[in-house]
Image: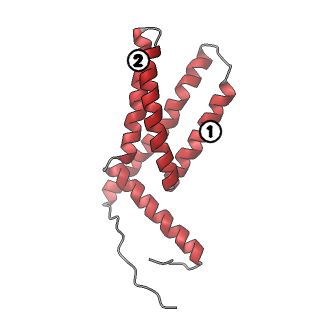
Amino acid sequence: MTKLPEQESPVSVAPDDLEQGQLWLRAVLIALPLLVAVPTVAGLLQGRTEGTLQEVLYLIATAVLMWNVWRGSVWSWRITVALSMLTGMLVFMAGLLGGETLMQGLVISAAGLAFLLLGLFLVADGPVRRALEARWEARTHDLRRRRDGSPEGRP
């Protein structure tokens, strides 16, 4: 079997841009679970323990999803973006409609906006997106190499 010549990578990223994108990607992937953890921690500080197990399971699922985005899973990225947007809209509306006080409503709405902004960071055409594309390409190349059993894989 003849080998095909290596093709150039469709994603060419400058090293500084890639490093900056990976830094911002890490920040987004850490911020999302932290936002999910805020209601749990606030409830525990107020002495409410009902539903804590379910919220801890949500945190674990969020962490697993973020880990898979970091590893380069496109499906995990799509799910993360969709959930960030949906959660952001729902939390924002809940803050507008369900806050017991004006300040509480503003804080909840700000959390909704934070979810929306973090989701937008993952889809924006910037350093984060280029870092994600480089990860996706590396993962695809690695999966092809494993599937084919060859050290170089197919282009």
Instruction: Work out whether 60 lies above or below 138.
Output: above
Q: Which residue is mark 2?
A: 96
Q: Secondary structure at mark 2?
A: helix
Q: Please state which amino acid type lies under the numbered disc 1.
A: Ile
Disc on res. 83: none
How far apart are the two marked residues, 2 and 1, measured between alpha carbons?
Answer: 28 Å
- Residue 84, given in percent of the width and then of the height, sits at 46, 37
Q: Which residue is mark 1?
A: 60
Q: Residue furthest top?
A: 101
Residue at the (59%, 73%) spot, across then down:
147
Mark 2 packing: few (<14 Cα in 10 Å), some, or many (20+)?
some
Q: Are marks 2 and 1 in contact (CB under 8 Å)?
A: no
Mark 1 packing: few (<14 Cα in 10 Å), some, or many (20+)?
few
**Is there any visible trace of residue 29 in the rendered image?**
no
Query: Residue 41's quadrant in the figure?
Result: top right
- Residue 122, given in percent of the width and then of the height, sits at 40, 45
Instruction: Work out whether 111 lies above or below 75.
Output: above
How many marks the image carries: the answer is 2
**Is there any visible trace of residue 74 in the rendered image?**
yes
Q: Please state which amino acid type lies under the numbered disc 2.
A: Leu
